[in-house]
Structures are given as C-alpha cells and as structure tokens.
Image (cartoon, rainbow, N blue to C red):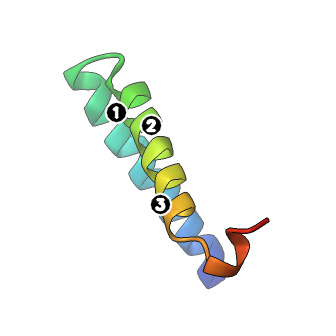
Amino acid sequence: MGNNQSLQVGSQAIAGFIGGLLAALFIEFPLIVCAACGLIGGVLLFMLRPAENLEQ
C-alpha cells in the first residue's frame, strides 16, 4: 500500500474504534460528538480564513 492509503485505512480504523467506544457509553453519543466536531471545524474555518477574503 502507498503512504496515503495506509493513513486512510488507519484513520478509518481509529474512527470506528472510537465510535464504538462512544456508543458503548451512550448510544447517541457518537452523533453528538460528530455534530460538535463539525461545528468546531466550521468556526475554525470562519475564523482562520485569509483577510483578503473578508470583503467578498
């Protein structure tokens, strides 16, 4: 496997493992965590965009 594909397989395995652990704690918890990560990512993208794109 190439490096990129190896990283992709590893990240998918880790995501499944962590999702399973979260679901064992509380069945709706993975969905809540996913929504929180999406919101945090959106806020970071909005806050860290280059200054020249602010006027568009």
Location of residue 5 with respect to 22 vertically, above or below: below
Determine contact: label 1, label 3, CB under 8 Å: no
Residue 24 seen: yes
- Report the residue that reaches farthest toward the front: 55
Q: Nearer the viewer, residue 19 or 53?
A: 53
Dot 2 lies on which element?
A: helix
Q: Quadrant of residue 51?
A: bottom right
**Residue labelled with disc 1:** 20
Question: What is the spatial separation of the Cα atoms under label 2 and label 3, in whole angstroms?
Answer: 15 Å
The amino acid on which the numbered mark 1 sits, given as a three-letter code, is: Gly
The amino acid on which the numbered mark 3 sits, given as a three-letter code, is: Leu
Determine contact: label 2, label 3, CB under 8 Å: no
Residue 1 seen: no
Provide residue 44's location: percent of width, then percent of height: 47, 60
Provide residue 34's location: percent of width, then percent of height: 45, 37
Provide residue 47's location: percent of width, then percent of height: 49, 64
Determine contact: label 2, label 1, CB under 8 Å: no
Earlier in the chain: of badge 2 and badge 3, it is: 2
Local packing at callout 2 (Cα closer than 10 Å; few below 14, some 14-19, many 20+) is few
- Report the residue that reaches farthest toward the right: 56
